[in-house]
Image (cartoon, rainbow, N blue to C red):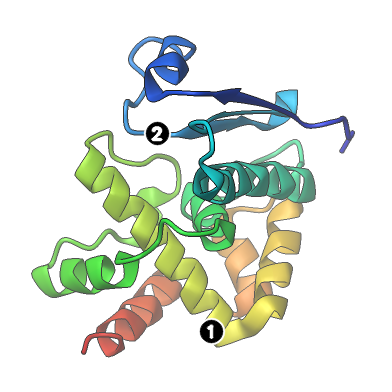
Amino acid sequence: PRSAPLEIWVYPSADDFRDAQMPNSRESIAGASYPGYYLIVAVVPDGSTNEVGRVVLHEVSHQVLYQATDNPFTYPPLWFDEGMATHFQVGGTDGFMEMVVRAHRDGTLFDITSLDVSFPYLPAQATLAYATSWSVVEYIEVTWSDDGISRLIAAFATGVPYDEALVAALGVDSDELNEDWRTWVASQAG
């Protein structure tokens, strides 16, 4: 993949940020990454170093994953992309595990494959999708370590279908990963 300097456009308020977005964009987002353009846009109010660590690191992670997996066939599944970005951001994940455990208990937890391509539009459901994605990446790291994450990134870079990448990197397909992750989530209750 080609490389270029990364540009970061910072907006001082959510209103300014929304004014710069496409019509009908999600109102609940605080940043966006445009990997093909090497561009990040983010809301960072004056003096808010916490938002730099949360939003900017999240969006930089998208750029890095794009560079690492760029191929002419496919992108990694959205749950992995957002899970990695949320995993590497600083802050903003407090309560995510409790949210995922509660959704599992209530029968409202997403299956991993339902988050392959898109997230729900409604803010509460979108937050659960981010929490779900984060927890799947946490599970992968706990189970297969950073080596498993690295193998998965390398497998996604080949452009093979998601299940082939998962089997090559972790030895499980998406159904097995989903089942094993749910078992792990249930064990986190308490």
Q: Is residue 111 above or below residue 173?
A: above
The amino acid type of the residue labelled 2 equals Ile
Residue 180 on image: x %, y %: 39, 82
Give SS at disc 1.
helix
Front one among 99 and 148: 99
Front one among 155 and 101: 101
Quarter of the N terminus within the rendering: top right
Q: Would residue 152 appear left or right of 13 to someone viewing this image? A: right
- Residue denoted by label 2: 29
Q: Is residue 7 above or below residue 169?
A: above
* Mark 2 crowdedness (10 Å alpha carbons): few <14, some 14-19, many ≥20: some
Q: Is residue 49 above or below residue 22?
A: below
Residue drawn at x 61%, y 77% is 170
Residue 69 on image: x %, y %: 74, 49
Residue 19 seen in the current view: yes
Q: Which mark is residue 54?
A: none
Quarter of the C terminus within the rendering: bottom left
How far apart, in angstroms, are the residues tagged by discs 1 and 2?
Answer: 28 Å
Residue drawn at x 76%, y 62% is 154
Residue 39 on image: x %, y %: 69, 26
Most distant residue in the front direction? 47
Residue 104 on image: x %, y %: 20, 71
Front one among 20 and 184: 20
Dot 1 or dot 2: first in sequence order is 2
The amino acid type of the residue labelled 1 equals Val
- Residue denoted by label 1: 142
